[in-house]
Amino acid sequence: MINRNRYILSKLAKVNVKDRKAILTNAPSELFQVLNLILKILADDKVKLSNTQKEKIKKHKGLIRRSSDLKITAIKRMLKNQRGGFIPAIIAAALPLIGPLIKKLL
């Protein structure tokens, strides 16, 4: 599931706000399940992050904790209406963590 949406996640991290909103509007529900999984992984304090990754998500930590327990529809609504750099910061911190996990599972 994560591997299938990896391309979309990397695009979400790089595009501007207008394009990000268009992608999220037309995105499949599986993408929001992946984003929910990423939020749960980052909310876990046992995950080891580098110092640069910690700095990127530091100001979003409260939002990560609040949204890690939300349902998929609530996350979809939240991410479509978000402003600022929440999604790029989260994806930039999570993709390097998830890549080795996918390789181990395959």
Image (cartoon, helix red, strand yellow):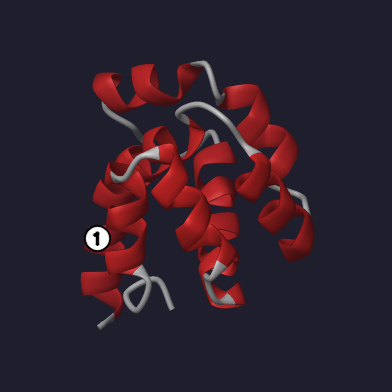
Q: Is residue 21 visible?
A: yes
Q: Quadrant of residue 13?
A: top left
Residue in view at x 54 percent, y 70 percent: 26
On the rendered structure, is 34 left or right of 8?
A: right
Q: Position of residue 104 (x, y in %)?
A: 24, 72
Residue that sits furthest to the bottom in the current view: 106
On the rendered structure, is 34 left or right of 55?
A: right
Question: In the figure, 3 relative to 17: above or below?
Answer: below
Question: In the figure, 53 relative to 38: above or below?
Answer: above
Q: Is residue 71 visible?
A: no
Residue in view at x 73 percent, y 52 percent: 77
Q: Quadrant of residue 5?
A: bottom left
Residue in view at x 52 percent, y 16 percent: 59
- Image quadrant for the C terminus? bottom left
Please tell me which residue lies in front, 85 or 15: 15
Disc 1 residue type? Gly
Please tell me which residue lies in front, 43 or 60: 60
Residue that sits furthest to the front in the current view: 18
Question: In the figure, 78 relative to 85: above or below?
Answer: below
Name the residue tied to disc 1: 99
Q: Position of residue 42 (x, y in %)?
A: 50, 41
Q: Quadrant of residue 67?
A: top right
- Image quadrant for the N terminus? bottom left
- Quick one: SS at disc 1? helix
Q: Position of residue 89 (x, y in %)?
A: 39, 33
Please tell me which residue lies in front, 19 or 14: 19
Q: Position of residue 78 (x, y in %)?
A: 70, 45
